[in-house]
Amino acid sequence: MLNKGLPEKDLFLFFAQKKGEDLDHDYILSSMCTPPHPVAVRAHCMFIETNLGDPGLFLGTASLEKLLIERLGTLFHHPTAGGYATSGGTESNIQALRLAKEQKKEIPAPNVVVPESAHFSFKKACDILSLEMRTVPLDSTLKMDAAKAAEIVDKNTICLVGVAGTTEYGLIDPISELAAIASERDIFFHVDAAFGGMVIPFLDHTIPFDFSLPGVTSIAVDPHKMGMGTIPCGCLLTRQPDMLTSLNIDTPYLSVKQEYTLAGTRPGAPVAGALAVLDYLGVEGMQAVVAGCMKNTWRLVDGMETYGIPRAVTPDLNVATFICKDVPDRWKVSWTRRGHLRIVCMPHVHRDRIEAFLEDIGELYA
């Protein structure tokens, strides 16, 4: 720490220099996050000092969190769902497994069954909670094989996990089939819809993945991804409104005397930002955003295949993957574990960005 503080001008010149070292979003094609919507930024700034870890001090902000959960619950066909705002999918997934373990405390050697495509947060969660993680292979379409999942589940399985919008390929596991397995065997079924949860409800066709399926117990969704909220804002929703209270611990010196959240200090600003976007755009506005992203995804797929670069798999959502060895240096892309080029067509990846990328890659492959 400096002995003497810097003048404000010098401080922010330094910050501006460092900000300039960040990548320009115009060339970021690999991220599942996007610059926040202006209304999210405005709402975030209004609530910048709020702490939902001590909600009795910030009653208005706490009421916004309840509204956010209600909005998402309604979107997921269960307006009375329980839940709270997390820091993102990792925290939501950890908490879901904590809930599953709490419900089956009598099982001495619990295991969790996840798809091969599961987010790496499940490895963290299982390590933290001392759970065996059993991985189900993918089928020929790179989705979780439900039949094999049914074989792997046993009497010690406390949670089955399906993904609605895989991180690498933008695919939706057979959630209906998995929900039926979970329901039949009385297993906690968690749907990781961190990405897809803010896409699937706004598609022009219906894909069941949420509480409309009786077997779904909990859902993770990240408004800071396709919801265009400020970072960090995820949410964990539960079918039973009071399910999370099983995780309560005493917090005697706070304005509430028990809490079930994982984090202590929890920023209220991103919650306000997430709600602002949902209420500002509404269903019709979100449908337009998602339609634009999907249109750009298919333009990218068509353009790449024109150059003889085939898709690795046909995506369900706005994530495109290709059998491709190289891309021009200025573009920030990513590669899947199977070696496929991966591009996420987020709201900032406009049509002109797709055309610029195709023009550049055409010089390599045309």
Image: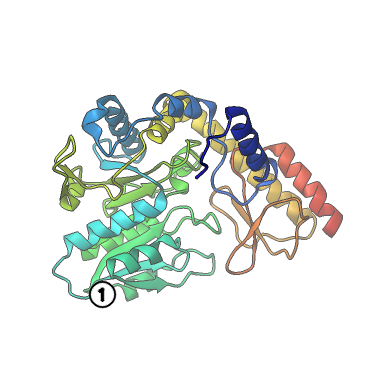
Tell me, yes or no, if residue 348 can be seen here.
no
Q: Nearer the viewer, residue 96 or 146?
A: 96
Q: Quadrant of the C terminus?
A: bottom right
- How is this picture coloured? rainbow
Q: Residue at x 18, y 34 (%)?
A: 255
Most extreme residue toward the front is 3
Q: Is residue 307 above or below residue 200?
A: below
Q: Nearer the viewer, residue 255 or 310?
A: 255
Residue drawn at (55%, 31%) of the image: 288
Left or right position of 211 against 319: left
Classify residue 150 by image quadrant.
bottom left
- Label 1 crowd bin: few (<14), some (14–19), many (20+), radius 10 Å: some
User: Residue 103 lies in what quarter of the image?
Assistant: bottom left
Is any atom of residue 106 visible in this view?
A: yes
Q: Quadrant of residue 93?
A: bottom left
- Give the x, y percent position of residue 161: 35, 61
Local SS, label 1: loop
**Viewer-nearest residue: 55 or 338:** 55
Left/right of residue 228 with respect to residue 344 in the rendered view:
left
Instruction: Report the amino acid beneath label 1.
Output: Asp
Q: Residue at x 41, y 71 (%)?
A: 136
Residue at the (63%, 40%) spot, across then down: 19
Q: Foreground: 71 or 36? A: 36
Query: Residue 125: percent from the left, percent from the top?
Result: 34, 63
Q: How many marks?
A: 1
Q: In this rendering, would 348 be left or right of 283?
A: right
Query: On the image, numbered disc 1 is attached to which residue?
Result: 154
Residue 270 rendering spot, x and y as whole percentages: 41, 35
